[in-house]
Amino acid sequence: MAQKPSIPKGTRDFGPAEMAGRNYIFDTIRSVFRTYGYAPIETPSMENLSTLLGKYGEEGDKLLFRILNSGDAFSGVDYDAFRVEGTENGYNSKALSLKVCEKGLRYDLTVPFARFVVQHQNEITFPFKRFQIQPVWRADRPQKGRYREFYQCDVDVIGSTSQLNELELVQIVDRVFALLDVNVCVKINNRKVLTGMAEICGFPDKVVDITVAIDKIDKIGIDAVEAEMVSKGLTAEAVEVIRPVLTLSGTSAEKIAVMRSLMSGQSASGIVSETGLKGLDELEELFGYIDAAGVGCDVEIDLSLARGLNYYTGAIFEVKAKDYAIGSICGGGRYDNLTGIFGLPNMSGVGISFGADRIYDVLKGLDKFPSEVTSTTKVLFANMGAEELRYLLPVVKSLRQSGVSCEIYPENTKLKKQFDYADKKHIPFLSIVGGNEVEAGVINLKNLNTGEQKAFAKDDTDGMIAFIS
């Protein structure tokens, strides 16, 4: 019995209709990136594990797809050297995996970008503005809106600390989703504010544990987040200091004012956080720019926004669709020293990533794809016989050279079958040219949506294009 074909969970095939929609998203995003002066690069699908490990936190490391070394990866391995008594399988599995896996599939595009900048620092001009549209892989549990293989559309600028870069990212988000006709809300926080929260609650060394917990608030709720913080060593008093921050409401200015009082020593602990105050200054400056720039989409401060990636040091962003229930569709932030890991310190950058797969799901769920996107062919020429084909071929060639996508039905068969083909492929125009049309030297074109029909001289390419445009 033949094996039933399948693909790994968390991956997907994309047929012509899906690819048309995806390319519509990619082309829209790419066009906006270019108008802001960003240039494209690409990096390999795989990176050295040494490049990837330790950049995404402990949970992120677990989600890395590792690639076995070529050939017999386990040949010559001294298993006794990795034996550890008392462990589940009797071995130091982490150390053993590093022995047999030197490479991994990239988890995101930001860390490879940092590696690229350091490796090519003498060839690029700073500030360096790049965009990158490529797939990434994460060994996550597949579910709605979460895949193991998915595309990211990243835009970053590195080599500048100006808050104008953060503004530009917000403007890019605003423009992209205006073009895609999706209502979104941009949520912004600052990692320095989160560091300040850890300081004023008396646990400055727990900032990673606090941010990892807070990052789950939308998924597990505030009570579970507080319980997780306690399990990581925070006291009930410390959690009490953090709680009002997570439930803070009001305008951006009001939120900043409340936080400024807390960071200035007016919390229950009485501790002052200079780092937190610096983060609030940056938020205030950024929101001043956003107001002045006239950004159209909703933008708000969300002090519970953490984003789990350890390399963020300043502003952090998350974008959510307002009219469709799905996770964040964009996310990013500022990183002050990501390139320092690779030997180029003090090179601040900021970027944001568009999740193309989730954006696709949003557009499909809201029926926002333009009708012309789903059709790759504009005109179908019916096949009425050999003589008619010879008459049509120069016409089809001329239309194609003018950028019109055309097909000739390959078989001379019943017209109903050819009509059905056009209908199933959402081809909007049909041309039926028989012996009478050949004798008269004309081309008939019919709009299948409206029923309108018109005849054109065989060489009137411009007239035909005007009719089908």
Image: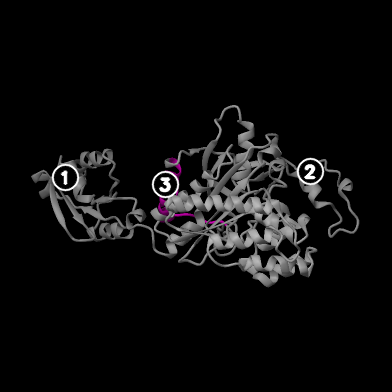
Q: CA distance from mark 1 to mark 3?
A: 29 Å
**Front-most of residues 65 and 77:** 65
Q: What residue would you read off at disc 2?
A: 99
Q: Amino acid at mark 3?
A: Asp
450 left or right, relative to 110: left
User: Is any part of residue 134 visible from this angle?
Assistant: yes
Q: Position of residue 416 (x, y in %)?
A: 24, 61
Q: What residue would you read off at disc 3?
A: 27
- Quarter of the figure that contains the N terminus: bottom right
- The crowding category of the residue bearing disc 3, from other C-alpha atoms within 10 Å (few below 14, some 14 to 19, many at least 20), is few
Q: Position of residue 26 (x, y in %)?
A: 45, 48
407 left or right, relative to 150: left
Which mark sits nearer the N-terminus, 1 or 3?
A: 3
Specify the segment rendered in magenta: 11-34
Q: What residue would you read off at disc 1?
A: 463
Which mark sits nearer the N-terminus, 3 or 2?
A: 3
